[in-house]
Amino acid sequence: MSSRPRRSVVAATALALVAGLSAAGASASTAPAGKDTRWNAAWAAAPQRPSIGFKPNWSEAGFDRHTLRQVVRVTQGGDRARIRLSNAYGASPLRIEGATVARTEGTKGAAVEKGTLRRLTFGGERAVTIPAGGQLSSDAAALGLDRFDSVTVTLRLAGTTGPATFHAQSFATSYRATGDHLTDTGGRAFGESTESWYYLSGVDVRGERPAKRDGVVLFGDSITDGFGSSADLNRRWSDALAERLAKAGKARPVVNSGIGGNLVLNDSAWFGDKSSTRFARDVTDLPNAGTVVVLEGVNDIGFSETDKPLYKPAPVVTAKELINGHRKLIRAAHAKGLKVVGATLVPFGGSDHYGERAAAVSDAFNTWVRTSGAYDGYVDFDKALADPADPERIRPAYDSGDHLHPNDAGYRAMARAVDLNTL
């Protein structure tokens, strides 16, 4: 990819996303990011508490004199970019000594495209301290990006951070190096890697004109998050939907707010805050969100079908309780002017979530999604993924192997099942 000409930087005041944020080197504001119509959320990840997670990660140990490099793919282009950082679950202030953004060399790896590396500032300063529980955005950086470009965000963490706010399952490789490698264009120093994202909760882009409020947010659990998809290949159903929209001439930014194991009705130390608690942060406050697709509930009804300690406590949930939880999300979306699309739960026969009670609740819930009219529209993933020979199970060609999560082909089938006119 050829280098684009450098444009003049327009320094935007660092936008704090929580009231009362007092960040050294950044101006505080109580305006949520969703109110700034110049920006589009082009990529997002829902923050989680530090935990062991499904795979080894660095969240509990945190960082100590490290440089952290993370690769994401944007679903909207623009001539300026900014990042959003979260210390939502930090026990102490987080000091960022420096940050950069660049286009990735290729589509993965720790190297960046020469000539594209931009230093980021926060209220005009290169370093910033984010209070415990805080979130903020960087100033605008003059970096031209096309839709589906891979973007590398690098953070220099010169001190000891303590446990780190993170997103447990990224299905993309993040890298770290000891010492200051903030402006390295090569990736040789970044010898450690993991499949999680840390502190980075969003990348926003903007152009010369105000952004349309047409962003699509996918909200849910591990199926939305992309569990079972191929790492570093961007094959979640959010990726497939963004690509399908672009191919159909209806391109819109699509961002992923899934959390593996997430629940509609209960908080979890491992699997994030319950849906209603995190809905504003992960959906309605995102810049120019216009539509949300909700796919969630299989964990609420399935955790109690197994004795795995990971899934405890797991209260038995009725269809009525699950439906009431979804009604709360619908009200929250409508209150902010968002269109909200519901999704039927996918078939899960043969998985560790399956049992007679869970199957009955799933059937009742799916019937409600299809017939109640409570959602502004719906997508029938149950029908799209079902095995014709046994509709309780995922079609073998779409099964990642655990009979619960789709594989790459299954996620593409989910994207094909969406009537684009409902979004």
Image (cartoon, rainbow, N blue to C red):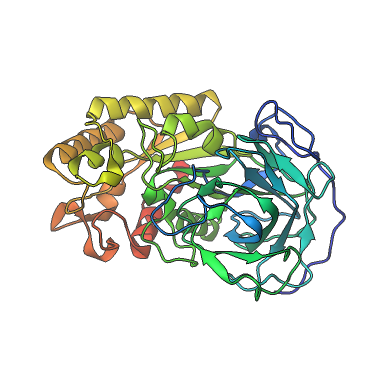
Is residue 109 rendered to the left or right of residue 1?
Answer: left
Is residue 138 rendered to the left or right of residue 10?
Answer: left
The residue depicted at 20 percent of the width and 38 percent of the height is: 363
Is residue 309 rendered to the left or right of residue 180?
Answer: left
- Residue 345 seen by the camera: no
Q: How many marks?
A: 0
Q: Position of residue 24 (x, y in %)?
A: 78, 38
Q: Position of residue 9 (x, y in %)?
A: 85, 52
- Residue 399 seen by the camera: yes
Q: Is residue 107 above or below residue 313?
A: below
Q: Quadrant of residue 377?
A: top left
Q: Position of residue 355 (x, y in %)?
A: 14, 43
Q: Position of residue 387 (x, y in %)?
A: 19, 57
List the single residue furthest toward the right: 8
Q: Is residue 37 above or below residue 330?
A: below
> In terms of depth relative to the viewer, which is nearer, 79 or 220?
220
Is residue 307 rendered to the left or right of residue 213?
Answer: left
> In terms of depth relative to the viewer, which is nearer, 233 or 99?
99
Quadrant location of the N terminus?
bottom right
The residue depicted at 38 percent of the width and 56 percent of the height is: 227
The residue depicted at 71 percent of the width and 63 percent of the height is: 102
